Image (cartoon, grey):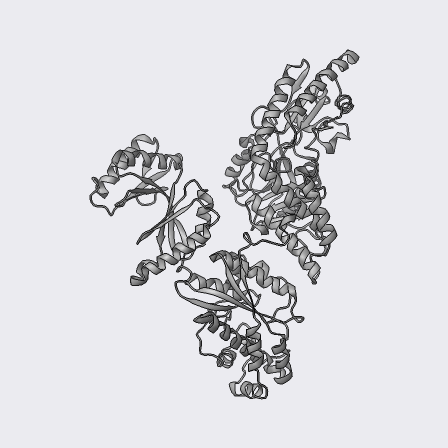
Amino acid sequence: MIYFDNSATTKPYKEVLDSFVTVSSEYFGNPSSLHSLGGQAEKLLSQAREQVAGLLKVKANEIYFTSGGTESNNIAIKGAALLNRHKGRHLITTSVEHASVRAAMEQLEQEGFEITRLPVDEYGRITVEDLEKSIRKETILISIMQVNNEVGTIQPIEEIGSILKKYPSILFHVDAVQSVGKVPLSLYKNNVDLCSLSGHKFHGLKGTGVLFIREGARLTPLFSGGNQERRMRSGTENVAGFVAMAKALRMTMMKSDAGIAGLAEIQHLLRKSLTKIEDIQIHTPVQHAAPHILNFSLKGIKSEVFIHALEQNGIFVSTTSACSSKKKSPSNTLLAMGVPESLAESAIRISLSFDNTEAEALKVLSVIEKTVNQLRKVMK
Amino acid sequence: MNYDRILIRYGEISTKGRNRNKFIDKLKKSVRIALAPFPKVKIEASRDRMYVLLNGENGLEIIGKLKNIFGIQSYSPAIKVEKDVEALKQASYELVNSQFKEGQTFKITAKRSDKTFELNTDGINQTIGAHLLKNIPGMKVDVRNPDINLRVEVRPDAIYLSSETIQGAGGLPIGSSGKAMLMLSGGIDSPVAGYLSMKRGVEIEAVHFFSPPFTSERSKEKVIDLSKKLAGIFGSLTLHIVHFTDIQQAIREQVPENYSMTSTRRMMLRITDEIRKKQEGLAIITGESLGQVASQTLESMYAINEVTNTPILRPLISMDKTDIIKIAEEIDTLDISIRPFEDCCTIFVPSSPKTKPKREKVNQYESYFDFEPLIQEAVQEVETIIIKPDSEHRSEFNELF
């Protein structure tokens, strides 16, 4: 099996699963309980928080544990909008965000907020000029992903961060779900107020996530209940999941430097060879792109057909983002980049992890070549 | 531009006459402890300056660490340049050019403690100023309010260039004012009192009163976590945990309820004083703030303080609660202090404690029972732990992370 769908989810590291099992079976107490089992669970929780904070180079009291990227994005966006609705009702985002940001924005729009969705160029990138032009007196939040989940484009987070120095009252949310470990992000330096991460995208478990909330930034919580996570996220804490996520993040960060170089090499190899195949068009830009995603279309062949053909050879890739691939609608990001609908319907996304190898890439390439030739015979 | 050293300016040490060497040694120790995670760093101390030689270690992180060290007035990342005008010109250009942004202004502040250098301060100002103006287009001079202030210090061994002065924590190096015992309850005030004393150079050891089952393991953990924060300032903290249950029960049996709090505090003070003697401390520090609760009225202090003539330092005595909370937030102890567990101060609080206890009365009540053996026993059985800051602490759970 060759797993090239790491932007959909990653395989949990064995060490991560071991921690999860140990904590779940031996330290199962509720951190809010007064007895020593509760005390152990609370200690584990705070050690997990400190470790995540240390790895992200922020303070422990700025880390809030959630159930994943979708929840972090929802708390960040709706929580900021609800708390600041009296200051203004204008939010800025892009036209290529993940569904959890896009849909949260749509919901707020129905509630009477105004949303500006910045367009992207042919490379999937917004311009900071567009962003600055769209800022108004009533703007309360800017939400922008660091790395696009479908094509891998990196947005100009640094430039946006430095512009926002002039607008201290606007909250800056960065969806970093796709970038953890693969594209560095300095939260303090770039004036990021809110940042979402998801455990299962870096070899942790599903159902675990992080929301960074800069000290001093305030949000309205979305859940009511026992006021866990410093009142921001009620609900008994998933201690085992968060310990496992802290470990996964450490392991990912440790592999990061060497890993990024390896990803870039494999990506380069894939790009070079795929470019040579007739009828393949690559959508992932050469510049400002993450090293682990490569999105391309095979003209005239529906993505689904291509994916199943690869699967027969034990190769797993995606159409677009996993969340929208079941809807069978073409990729939002590609359409926003101006890719014609017919071509967008043929899009395939390869996404790598640090564990993928060049040998795997070569195998995939040869299967793709074979598959292209076979399919061409059928389709033409 | 890469800095290769950080220049540290001493605070009040400079005025300490003959004790100066001792102060510098203590400061050097503080710096060494704070920079322990950076093994390649070298620290050089002279009479009026200290240099941290980076040797390739992460300058930004080290700058962050220095911020919390007491006894440092200010510090500047700096470059060492040989005493040669051309070398000085080149290094000045590189340093300023690396910071310069369109439209910014600069000035040069030259100091020459080595009078043999060929240029005097005016000469340095003019030569370097002209060199920068010629080579960095768009830059202007502003001697009143410059964006970049290039400091040039000509010293006997070399010239030091720096362009940024960072405010230090002030105060005196820890240990330079001797040792004292901090009564650490787990509340908001006592860690702040400890911190402020450390800032004035006091080396502290903490004393905590533990009364199982009336106070839980988790309240003890809370105190250990607070101690870890204080340990972070000086590398470690000695924590004495006193088992206090027997004494507390004896007080309940012997002393009327409305005087039990006064008597409890007197016993705690007696025990702390005994530990202080053993540890060769010179004072006792408490987090008392005048009028905050019943035990902190002047009358109470008068009745409680009777048991010892050891100096009792109360750094918070005239501070408002809101100001204390602000410091607790800054030193990162507030979140720990507000964890909701009973501690030795909250349990056994009588419903209406005396706010104006009398010495005669409390002495009379205590006279019916000999507390001394219990006190000696508590001192004998004190549990002493050396607390390391969190980062170094090997937790029982580490393999899970």
Query: Residue lying furthest front in this view?
Result: B380
**Image quadrant in which you'd find residue B364:** bottom right
Q: Which one is nearer the viewer's eye here, A220 or B11?
A: B11
| Quadrant in the rendering for residue A302 | top right
Residue at image x 45%, y 42%? B57
Q: Position of residue B68 (x, y in %)?
A: 45, 54
Which of A271 and A380 lies nearest the eye of the viewer? Answer: A271
Look at the image and tell me whether residue A271 can be seen. Answer: yes
Query: Camera-side residue: B361 or A370?
Result: A370
Describe residue B64's horizontal placement relative to residue A70 as left or right: left
Q: Position of residue B175 (x, y in %)?
A: 41, 62
Residue B225: x percent and y percent?
58, 59
Quarter of the image with the N terminus of chain A in it: top right
Residue A273 against residue A328 in the figure, above or below: above
Kindly tell me whether residue A213 is visible in this rendering. no
Residue positioned 59% across, 29% down in the render: A262
Residue B154 x %, y %: 27, 44
